[in-house]
Amino acid sequence: MKSKLFFLTIALTAAAFTASANSTDPTNGEESKKTDITGGVVNVDTKKPIGNVSVTAYSAAKKEKVVYTDANGNYSFDELRAGTYRLVFEKTGYKKLTKEKVLIRPDEGCQLNVEMDNEDEMQILPGSLFNFD
């Protein structure tokens, strides 16, 4: 049930992004610039959105642009040229996540939702490593 609600939330968020990206600006009558990549970032275990995640787009070996997720875990890139990108998601306390071969086609948007996993924490257990009896 929770997963259905999560996917419904993501779908509604995507629809809102698409509607706003394709809306017409009444001040000049021109169509607004379409966003190239949109998506959401959630915790893999809790499915709760993760805010302030750094999302970096690379084309070939060149860094193109960096954006951050909002409080609802949403991010969006615009003004990226058509091509293949590598997206890197990073936040302290979470494992770095890389998505390879994200394709942007001319005049088409792309949606990429991801789940990030908590970083493994080292646990120190009581006891000694050496026994000097």
Image (cartoon, helix red, strand yellow):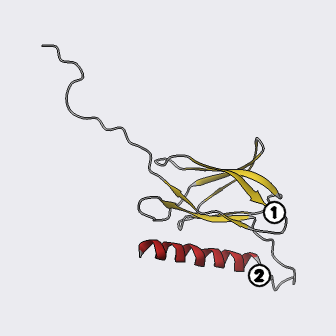
Residue sitting at x 36%, y 38%: 122
Q: Earlier in the sequence, mark 2 or mark 1?
A: 2
Label 2 – label 1 distance at C-alpha: 20 Å
Quadrant where the C terminus lies? Answer: top left
Q: What amino acid type is highlighted by mark number 1?
A: Arg
Corner quadrant of residue 61: top right
- Which residue of the protein is positioned furthest toward the top in this rendering? 133
Residue sitting at x 59%, y 79%: 12
Q: What amino acid type is highlighted by mark number 2?
A: Ser
Corner quadrant of residue 120: top left
Looking at the rendered structure, the secondary structure element under dot 2 is loop
Q: Is residue 19 above or below residue 112?
A: below
Corner quadrant of residue 83: bottom right
Question: Horizontally, is 92 left or right of 103 in the view?
Answer: left
User: Which is more toward the observer, 125 or 102?
Assistant: 102
Question: Horizontally, is 78 left or right of 55 in the view?
Answer: right
Residue sitting at x 78%, y 71%: 34
Looking at the rendered structure, the secondary structure element under dot 1 is loop
User: Which is more toward the observer, 63 or 100?
Assistant: 100
Residue 63 lies, in percent from the top left, at 74, 45
Quadrant where the N terminus lies? Answer: bottom left
Question: Horizontally, is 25 left or right of 111 in the view?
Answer: right
Q: Which mark is residue 28?
A: none
The residue tagged 2 is: 23
Q: Is residue 70 above or below residue 63?
A: below
The residue tagged 1 is: 105
